[in-house]
Amino acid sequence: MTTGLPSQTQVIELLGKEFARAGYEIEDVVIDARLRPPRITVIADGDTALDLDTIATLSHSASALLDSLENVQDNYVLEVSSPGVERPLTSEKHFRRARGRKVELVLSDGSQLTGRVGETGGDTVALVVRHGRDWAIHDIPLAKIVKAVVQVEFSAPAPAELELASGLIGGQARRTEAGA
């Protein structure tokens, strides 16, 4: 049975280079032929935030490329979006892209930490956490992180906390390894 829609693999192969030229990679493609009109959702992420202008540009070029396929029906809805805050952080690039964001971690020893993502390098992420009245940086091996989720914030973080996360004064904080 043909749906008149490209497969997930076809969409990734067709759009991957175009998104890469813009500095983004396709994280997922969801095709829902049950909707009327059918929907093709392309989820993209990159080291810079996916803003509305970029989404419009990527949507326009993606639509033109998809329309050029012979087997694609005329009516479909194309949606280009970022993964959103509900996506768990599962790789080094996710942590790198979440720098400055508040996250909640569950570690392999069962402990939990909440803090702001700082520098991520190789197999370690720096997490800025409250240490008494000051801030501390915990270097946490990615292999020890079982679960990591970005937290939604309703108030502005402390300037010192943001400075540490962005690396402006990284040498002025107490630095420890997870579990230390």
Image (spheres, rainbow, N blue to C red):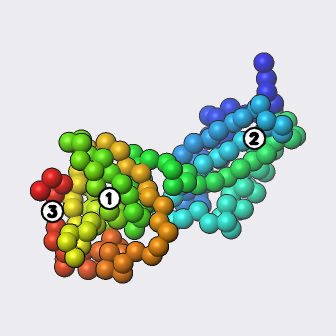
- The answer to whether residue 66 shows anywhere in this view is yes
Which of the two residues, 114 or 139, is positioned nearer the viewer here? Answer: 114
- The answer to whether residue 122 shows anywhere in this view is no
The residue carrying mark 2 is 39
Figure label count: 3
- Secondary element type, mark 1: strand
Q: Could you classify mark 3 by the number of other residues whose Cα lies within 10 Å: few (under 14), some (14-19), or many (20 or more)?
A: some
Q: Earlier in the sequence, mark 3 or mark 1?
A: 1
Residue 179 in the figure: left or right of residue 130: left
Q: Could you classify mark 2 by the number of other residues whose Cα lies within 10 Å: few (under 14), some (14-19), or many (20 or more)?
A: some
The residue carrying mark 1 is 114
The residue carrying mark 3 is 176
| Amino acid type for the residue under numbered disc 1 | Thr
Position of residue 12 measured from the top left corner of the image (x, y, whole percent): 61, 41
How far apart marks 3 and 1 lie (CA) works out to 15 Å
How far apart marks 3 and 2 lie (CA) works out to 47 Å
Which of the two residues, 94 or 135, is positioned nearer the viewer here? Answer: 135
Query: Relative to 49, does residue 110 appear above or below in the rendering?
Result: above
Residue 172 in the figure: left or right of residue 146: left
Residue at the image position 19 percent from the left and 79 percent from the top: 172
- Secondary element type, mark 2: strand
Q: Quadrant of residue 4?
A: top right
How far apart marks 1 and 2 lie (CA) works out to 37 Å
